[in-house]
Amino acid sequence: MNSNLHIITGNKGFVGLNLIDYFKRQKKETVGVSRTPKNEELSYETLSLKQLNQAKSFIHLAGKAHDLKKTSEDKEYFEVNTDLTKKLFDQFLQSDCEVFIYMSSVKAAADEVVGVLTEEITANPVTVYGKSKLAAENYILSKQIPENKRVYILRPCMIHGPNNKGNLNLLYSFVSKGIPYPFGKYENARSFVSVENLCFIINELIENTSVPSGIYNVADDASLSTTELVQTIGNGIGKPAKVLNIPKFFVNILAKIGDVLPLPVNSERLQKLTENYEVSNTKIKKALQKELPLSVKEGIKKTIASF
C-alpha cells in the first residue's frame, strides 16, 4: 500500500478541487475516479482491488446534490447517493485501503433544526436527497469494520469557499449593488463551514489513527445570523451593508407575490435566508483535539474576496 496515495470521487466538484489542492500542499498524491476518466483518472466501471490496495484512503465526495428546479427523478438520487456508495464501500472493505470517508450531509439528519443539531439526533430527513444520503449512511453502519480500517461519515452544513456560488452569491449581489437587505426583523442563527476547514478535517482524519470511526458533523465554530452575514460581506468588500427592518407580515406578503411573479424574493428563498440551522462541531473537535484554521468570519471573507 502507498501510504501517500488517496483516491477521490467527485474530484472535479467544488469540494474535490479544493481537497486536491489542499492535499498537494500536504505533499499527498491523489487520483480521481470518474464516469469519463481522463489521463490518470480511474473509472467507476473498472475500479479494481489492485487499485484500491495501493491507496491509504478512499474519499467518496461524488453525489447528486439538491435539485432546486425539482426536475430530477427520485430514483436518480438513490442510484447515485445510495447504490454507488454501497458498491464503493463494499470494494473498500475487501481491499487493503485503510480509511474510508463518506461525504454525507446534515440534511441526512434533519431538514429543520430546533436548538442545535448534534450527532445524537434520530435522523428524520424529509427530502429525497436527505433520504438517499441516510440510506447510504445506514448501509455503511450496518457493516462490520475490520480492526485495521477506519470509516468516517461526515455531515457538513452549508459549505462555502472561493468561487462557490450558493446563497452567499445572492447576498453578495444585494450588498455590492447597494440594495438594502430587507429582512432585518428576522433573528436567526445558521452554521456554515468553509471548504478550507472541511479539507483540514479530512486531512486530520486520515492522519490521526486515534479518531474512532463514526458519524461527525462538520461546521465552523460559531453560527451567524443572516443580518451578521450581510454585515460581514459589507466589511469584506468595504461597502457598509444597509439593513431594513421591514415588518414580517409585509415581507411575507412580498414573498407570496414572488411565488407568482419573478421577484428576487419568494417563499422558499425567504425561508432559506431566515431559518435557524445551527450545527454542533463539538464531537469532531473533541476527537481531533485541534482548533480549526479559520473562524467563520475569516472563512466568509475569503469566499467573498473571490466573487
Image (cartoon, rainbow, N blue to C red):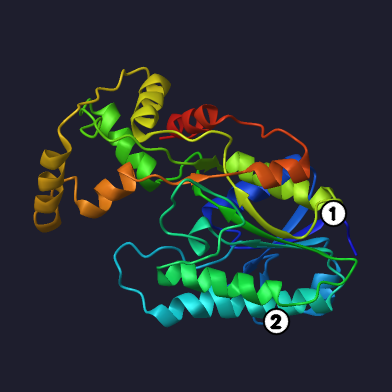
- Which mark identifies residue 90? none
Q: Position of residue 74 (x, y in %)?
A: 40, 79
In this view of the protein, can residue 37 be seen by the observer?
A: no
Check disc 1 and report the residue beneath it: 4
Q: Position of residue 24 (x, y in %)?
A: 73, 45
For the residues bearing labels 2 and 1, Cβ distance under 8 angstroms: no
Depth check, front residue: 196 or 295: 295
Q: Residue at image x 38%, y 28%?
A: 228
Depth check, front residue: 13 or 115: 115
Check disc 2 and report the residue beneath it: 46
Q: How far is disc 2 from disc 1 in space, using C-alphas?
A: 22 Å
Asked where in the image residue 169 lies, by quadrant, the reply is: top left
Task: Name the secondary structure under disc 1.
Answer: loop
Q: Residue at image x 76%, y 59%?
A: 6
Q: Quadrant of the N terminus?
A: bottom right
Task: Name the secondary structure under disc 2.
Answer: loop
Up-down relation of residue 165 to residue 4 (above or below): above
